[in-house]
Image (cartoon, rainbow, N blue to C red):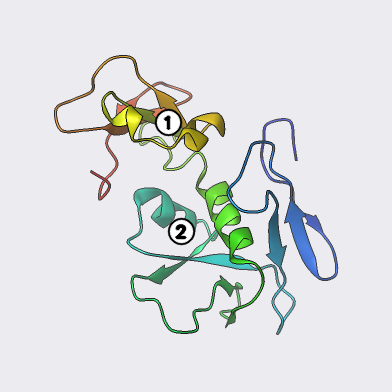
Amino acid sequence: MSEEGECKAVSSVTRSTCVPSAPEPGPGLCVRPDCPICGAPAVPVHFGLPTQAAREAAEDGALILGGNVLPSRMPIWACADGHRWSGGDDRDRVALIHRVLRGRPRCPLCTGLSVRLVYPPGRELFDLLDVTDGTAVLSHTPGPAGLSWQQLCLDCHHVWTPDQER
């Protein structure tokens, strides 16, 4: 883990592990297995309607968008060569997805990292884990009508509403 909080994976023969600096969902570690076919590092498969942050992470190769339909035996990992497989602890996959989505979507003005800016009264509904792990901040003033949150750039302080997440 670097001083800036970025994951610096430590490779081993069978897996890479990143130890988060802030609380994560799941067991607290994000264990990234290697592909059982080619040995390449795994990328988590993310299911559901993709947010702007998830689409951005997929474009960067940090996760695979698995779609909205969950197969009976869903592959939860994939590699750059296109192999997909199941196995391992799903909490590790979820923790890794949270890790790669942190700071996304990037600011449309300066490409800086962002956090959710949560307005009252929506802040009562917001998960405090997101506040304690640094993915959200709470506003003391109401936001625009009909919005419970927006994104806030940590660099230039631009505030915007990501698409498909309203």
Q: Is residue 68 above or below residue 150?
A: below
Which of the two residues, 71 or 27, is positioned nearer the viewer here? 27
The answer to whether 77 appears left or right of 64 in the picture is right
Query: Can you name the residue that lies furthest to the right here?
Result: 13
Residue 96: % across, % down: 60, 55
Q: Quadrant of residue 3?
A: top right
Q: Is residue 112 visible?
A: no
Residue 143: % across, % down: 23, 23
Give SS at disc 1.
loop
Which numbered tag is attached to residue 59?
2
Residue 12: % across, % down: 85, 64
Residue 108: % across, % down: 35, 36
Residue type, numbered disc 2: Glu
Considering only order in the chain, which callout, 2 or 1, is on the residue closer to the N terminus? 2
Q: Quadrant of residue 39?
A: bottom right
The answer to whether 20 appears left or right of 51 in the picture is right
Total numbered labels: 2
Q: Is residue 32 above or below residue 80?
A: above
Q: Could you tell me which residue is drawn at 26 percent across and 26 percent down?
A: 121
Q: Is residue 45 above or below residue 31?
A: below
User: Which image quadrant: the C terminus?
Assistant: top left
Q: Could you tell me which residue is drawn at 27 percent across and 47 percent down?
A: 165
Which of the two residues, 114 or 97, is positioned nearer the viewer here? 97
Residue under label 1, please give it: 110
Give SS at disc 2.
helix
Which of the two residues, 27 or 154, is positioned nearer the viewer here? 27
Residue type, numbered disc 1: Cys
Q: Whole-Å distance between the Cαs marked 1 and 2?
A: 18 Å
